[in-house]
Each structure stands twice: as C-alpha cells, then as structure tokens.
Image: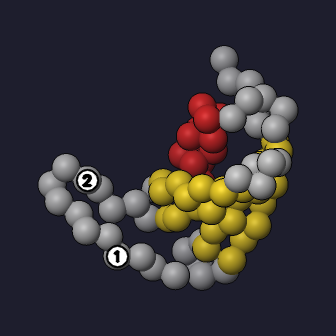
Amino acid sequence: MWYKYNCDKYTTHMRYVYNIKDEQGKEEVIQAMSYKKCLKQLNNKYKPGEVIQVKYTNKKDHNLLKYVKIKRVE
C-alpha cells in the first residue's frame, strides 16, 4: 500500500500512513516517517492512560495492528 500525494517544495512525502482509533471509536489518519515518530505525535495528542489502536503496513507489506497505551513523557 503505497500512496502518492501531491507534493510541492513546502510539503514532504511521508513514508507510512497510520490509521488511529481511540477508545471512543474516533478514527483519524497520521502520516509519519517511522513508527517511533508516530508514537511521539500520539503522546502529544492523547491523555496518559488511554489505549490507542494503530493500524499500518510496514516496509515488508505486512499489515500490523498494535495497541498502544499512552504514557506521560517528561
């Protein structure tokens, strides 16, 4: 699953597309260059203690589903 986006010199093409679903069932899409950078974005968006579902396709084209518990970052 490789997406093509319209890019100009002010936007960058993100390597992965992550489908995020929170405990209330609200869904959103996050683009990031790596799973670690996606987790950093999630720590800023959600409250500590929430469990978030993350769905994405890795570089070997395997579909992955992970549950992430948001932790407080200092």
Type of amino acid at the residue the image marks with label 1: Lys
As helix, strand or loop, the secondary structure at mark 1 comes to loop
Vertical order, 71 against 27 (above or below): above
Q: Which mark is residue 41?
A: none
Vertical order, 38 against 55 (above or below): above
Instruction: Tell me which colouring the rendered structure shows.
Output: secondary structure
Give the class, few, some or many, for how many residues have Cα within 10 Å of label 2's Cα (few <14, many ≥20): few
Type of amino acid at the residue the image marks with label 2: Thr
Query: Does residue 34 show up?
Result: no
Where's residue 6, x and y in %? 25, 68
**What is the C-alpha distance between the residues marked 1 and 2?**
13 Å
Residue at which label 1 appears: 4
Query: Does residue 45 show up?
Result: yes
Give the class, few, some or many, for how many residues have Cα within 10 Å of label 1's Cα (few <14, many ≥20): few
Nearest to the observer: residue 25 or residue 4: 25
Quarter of the rendering containing residue 51: top right
Quarter of the rendering containing residue 2: bottom left
Where's residue 48, x and y in %? 78, 29
Residue at which label 2 appears: 11
Q: Residue at x 69, y 77 (%)?
A: 63
N-terminal of the pair, mark 1 or mark 2, is 1
Where's residue 56, x and y in %? 63, 68
Furthest residue to the top?
A: 74
Q: Quadrant of the C terminus?
A: top right
